[in-house]
């Protein structure tokens, strides 16, 4: 009984720390589409907050790049699921991602100036790293439709670029 | 009179032929799925490099401390090379994209 409770608690803690880690089962294509789209939406929301809050030229330019790229990729994703007649399906990973992003936004909303810029950019590095790791190890290998897989692979290259771009901006803030 | 015009015309054609090989070229670099292709381009001063972006996102061709060309999604942009030498360029938005330009005088 006790062991089961501990295991459940450990699983719960794991979920909040790393939304992707709890996906023991292979996600289906409708779930993968939902996760990828959600990950994009969450980064667009973070970008909008940064555009509104930051006074730093580099940070605002970076946030605009994120907003523009993720909107373009998500539009492609929507076009593809429509074409494939796949209905994106909400799932525990999408929900965990959204919850973590909501908490991060609440944290960011309390910050201003250089403290905001630093926290936003550092989170962008960490977030892209996390999503890229999930794409590489879980989402791309699990995708069964070839077109979906190909879109995810291009997405991975774009987001790896974002990760490097974020690291570059983070370096400039120091 | 007719013959004179013809001679003049053929003389002009010959002149055009001798000039043509020295004319500047346009070299195309395709961007597809975040890859500059060909990755390395050899050109001469006066040539034009044209980047054709097939992606749905914007890219740049940027030389650190040098020039930058903005390449909008599904569009092309070009640059006429003015100086000899080799430069590495990258995309400022996606620094994992890299290319090289080798310019002969």
Image: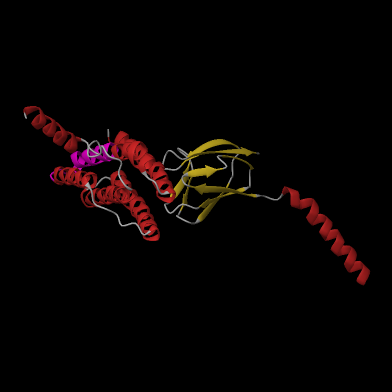
Residue B96: x and y, percent? 43, 38
Residue B39 lies in quadrant: top right
Q: Is residue B4 left or right of residue B70?
A: right
Residue closer to the observer: A55 or B42: B42
Residue A91: x and y, percent? 23, 48
Residue closer to the observer: A25 or A154: A25
Q: Judge whether residue B93 can be spotted in this image.
A: no
Q: Is residue A77 left or right of residue A112?
A: right
Furthest toward the bottom, the residue is B1
Residue A31: x and y, percent? 29, 49
* B29 over A126 or under it: above or below: below
Residue closer to the observer: A5 or B70: A5
Q: Residue at point 19% right, 43% down?
A: A96
Residue A121: x and y, percent? 26, 40
Q: Residue at point 51% right, 48% down?
A: B31
* B8 over B98 or under it: above or below: below
* Residue numbers of the magenta segment: A110-127
Q: Tell me the chief SS of the magenta region.
A: helix
* B52 over A124 or under it: above or below: below
Q: Is residue A31 left or right of residue B99?
A: left
**Is residue A100 rendered magenta in the image?**
no
Q: Residue at point 15% right, 47% down?
A: A109
């Amino acid at each position: 009984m006790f062991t089961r409770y501990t295991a459940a608690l450990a699983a719960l803690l794991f979920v909040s720390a790393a939304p992707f880690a709890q996906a023991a089962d292979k996600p289906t294509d409708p779930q993968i589409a939902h996760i990828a789209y959600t990950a994009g939406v969450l980064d667009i929301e973070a970008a909008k907050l940064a555009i509104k809050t930051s006074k730093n030229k580099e940070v605002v330019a970076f946030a605009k790049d994120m907003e523009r790229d993720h909107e373009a990729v998500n539009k492609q994703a929507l076009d593809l699921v429509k074409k494939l007649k796949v209905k994106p399906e909400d799932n525990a990973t999408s929900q965990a991602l959204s919850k973590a992003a909501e908490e991060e936004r609440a944290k960011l909303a309390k910050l201003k100036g250089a403290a905001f810029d630093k926290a936003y950019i550092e989170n962008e590095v960490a977030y892209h790293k996390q999503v890229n790791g999930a794409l590489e190890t879980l989402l791309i290998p699990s995708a069964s439709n070839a077109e979906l897989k190909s879109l995810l692979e291009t997405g991975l290259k774009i987001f790896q670029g974002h990760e490097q771009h974020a690291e570059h901006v983070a370096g400039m803030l120091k | 009179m007719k013959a004179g015009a013809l001679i003049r015309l053929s003389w002009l054609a010959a002149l055009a032929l001798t000039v043509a090989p020295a004319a500047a070229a346009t070299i195309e670099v395709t961007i597809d799925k975040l890859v500059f292709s060909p990755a390395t381009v050899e050109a001469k001063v006066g040539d034009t490099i044209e980047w054709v972006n097939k992606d749905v996102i914007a890219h740049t061709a940027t030389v650190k401390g040098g020039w930058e060309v903005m390449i909008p999604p599904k569009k092309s942009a070009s640059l006429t090379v003015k100086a000899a030498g080799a430069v590495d360029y990258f995309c400022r938005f996606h620094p994992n994209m890299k290319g090289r330009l080798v310019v002969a005088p």
